[in-house]
Amino acid sequence: MKWRLVPGWSAALILVTEFTFFALLLAPRSGGPHTFANAANVALILKYSSIYGIGAIGAAMVIGAGGIDLAPGAVIALASVLTGHLFIIEGWPLWAACSLGLAIGFVTGGLAALLIVGARLPPFIATLGVMGIARGAAFLITEGRFYDLSQRLPAGTAPLGLPLSAWPGAVMLVFAAVFQFVMVRTAVGRHILATGGNEVAARYAGVHVGRVKAFVYITGGALAALSGVVLGVVQGQGKADLATGYELDIIAAAVVGGASLSGGRASVVGAVIGSLIFGVLRNALAQIPGGTFADRFILGVAVLVIVVMDRMATREAT
Amino acid sequence: MSPALLATRRLTVRYGATAALRGVDLDIHGGEVHAVVGENGAGKSTLLRVIAGAVLPSAGVVHMRADVRVAWVPQETILPPDLTAAAWVFLGRELHGRLGVLRERAMQDGAASALRTIGCSASPNARLGTLAVTQRKQVQLARALHVEPDLLLLDEPTAVLGDSEAARLFAQVRTLKQRGTGICYVSHRLDEVLAIADRVTVLRDGERVSTSPASVVDVGTLVQQMVGRDVQPRHRSDRSTGALFLQLSDVATAHVRGLSLGVRSGEVVGLAGLVGAGRSEVLEAIAGLRPLRAGRIACAVPPVFVPEDRGSKGLVSTLGLRENLFLPAEGWFLHRRREHRDAARWIERLSIRTHGADAAIESLSGGNQQKLLLARALRHEPRLLLLDEPTAGVDVAAKAEIHDLIAQLAAGGAGILLASSDLPELLALCDHIVALREGTVVGTLAAVDASEQRVAGLITGAA
């Protein structure tokens, strides 16, 4: 029997099944409002999944190109902290603080690209280094302080007419659409998957693999920073030890969404759905007594199961 | 003849869509030399790999008693460079004392004696990396003989041996025969085969065409059975050669030094040499994929490179046929409809057998994968084409089609530099052949002066 996680669609199936399962499981005994399957909760799930989802878009592209990025968690923290510091301590206008927060993602991504393409370091090592530098920079900036931007913003702030709490989801969906298009309908997308599928063959065919790799790492860094800025502004989280370990959830979301760790296969839409799968899981577990303790355990098991399924499918195909 | 040591029934080996062996029935008896011949890609090496146990059959059976000792000398002479000859002769059967301490002296002596038997002058303590390819082959043979096998599998053993070394090998083979060992001898040197074998089996495109006593067949019959049609000696139509498209002056790369050659419009120049001689490096350097250590490369027209080893260096298996054909994609956006149309045209032009433009690479046979790779190159309408092993592992029919294509391109004015280890291919297609051995040019032959023997002699350095 030959089957595989068709990028995107089987992840969607898993999401729908999962949501239905929890909707049934958490249905109120006696007639009353459903604590899980209601619009406000879904909006909450979307909002919290976006922190991983935006980063997972970048991870899908990096993994598709045959690489790996361990820096996102640290970059999220750095961007949120930098934005907070500039806005609160230095008194910059919000748009300026956010712009620089975003820019730092280009810098960290650029550093990763330099190490990987220029110095030919293995991506694991290079991005591990960037992660340390970014995290360290975050601590240097905050000196242990905690920035809460949400306190400083007037209530009812709605940039561009969209309430603050809708921004994370909106940003994720917009960029998912943009990069899904890039991956599926542009030459860059094909070159990314060719580089990940067989870097030597891609290079021999004439693909500029160095440029491709630089593109995915810089974009990944920028997306992580975007996630950090959004997190800082919307959720008021601005501390240096933020988002520790998020890179693993981000990678897991991308893999669940169809990215193959051996490179050459990835789906942006799938990665976003993957982040929603984990978001639903976390949300549902929080509503089950004692569920939060099982959170990481179940997540770990789920990732293993899906990765094993991916390996098996890949091996059958060869 | 003694009872069969080995019998295969309906043996089939598939790699993806390619069937390397199809329903092969073969038996080898003790005390006989059973030769297996066929074109490149016919399945000879695969057959030996199955018998040796390195590859599992996809279908069919191999009957062999469990106590039969098998020694296999594969075609490749790539050995771990830091092991000594003695270590290789005894690998897996080391002599050791009670605590597992190796008895080095005994192994040295044993290896020295084995090497002497096969006529190898290398010292048992010599590191394999320092030995010439001929000596490495002899070390492999010494190991096989030392095992005292019941069944000996030899895959192109004389490809890197000179006349005297080959004679020594045959003497050993005859001795083994008398002792009741069964020998399966794969070679494409038909004269040799007829001299040493008792029976000859011909394979073509993975199928057994015939098995006959060596006394009743001659070279012509064998060739006809190998190729499946009357072979006309390929005559190069007199191509007029024109402007100089490529000039290499004293070029040096990692393993090559002092290489100078030129390729003109309408000319096919061959690069002959053993594995490791540096041919691929030279082509990669011309294509700009590898830095030059010395010398100059002058291309009057942009070169288009078709790498060897299409599975690992040519095609991206996670992408489909169309995506591999249009790699790199031109422009910013992908034009799926236009690509489908153009892909259909290329599929027809090169007779690529596939179920569609989006077929998975693994669904294509080796020959069709190679044609896809060529189509990708031809899209650029190359005036200068660099081909590295363009018919490796390709079936007979596709190989002929590719050869015709190369001849057509040259007739149309393209200049072609062809690196190949298939000597008959080089002789059939090339106007000149440049022979490399261990990184230096050891001879340049014009087509009229070249013969398989002369070229083989140059690239191995054997007498």
Image: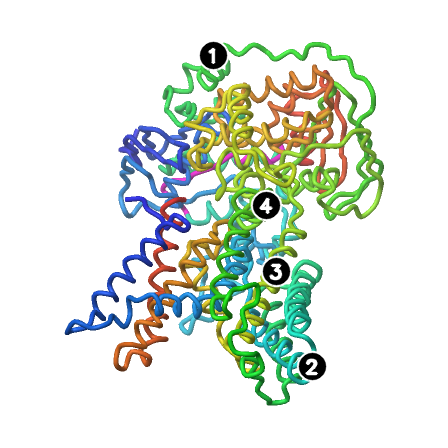
Nearer to the camera, B85 or B423: B423
Instruction: From the image, tell me which residue sits under label 1.
Output: B229
Q: Do the residues labelled 2 and 3 touch (CB within 8 Å)?
A: no
Q: Mark 3 lies on which chain?
A: A
Residue found at x 72% / y 21% = B414
Mark 2 Cα shell of 10 Å, populated few (<14), some (14-19), many (≥20):
few
Magenta span of residues:
B148-162
Dot 2 amino acid type? Gly
Chain of the residue that carries numbered disc 4 in the rendered image: A
**Measured from the top left, where is residue A35 in percent x and y?**
27, 72
Callout 1: few (<14), some (14-19), or many (20+) C-alpha neighbours within 10 Å?
few
The type of residue carrying mark 3 is Tyr
Closer to the chain start, of discs 2 and 4, is 2
- In percent of width and height, residue B139 lies at 55, 47
Q: Which of marks 2 and 3 is nearer the N terminus?
A: 2
| Label 4: how many Cα within 10 Å (few below 14, some 14–19, many 20+) | many
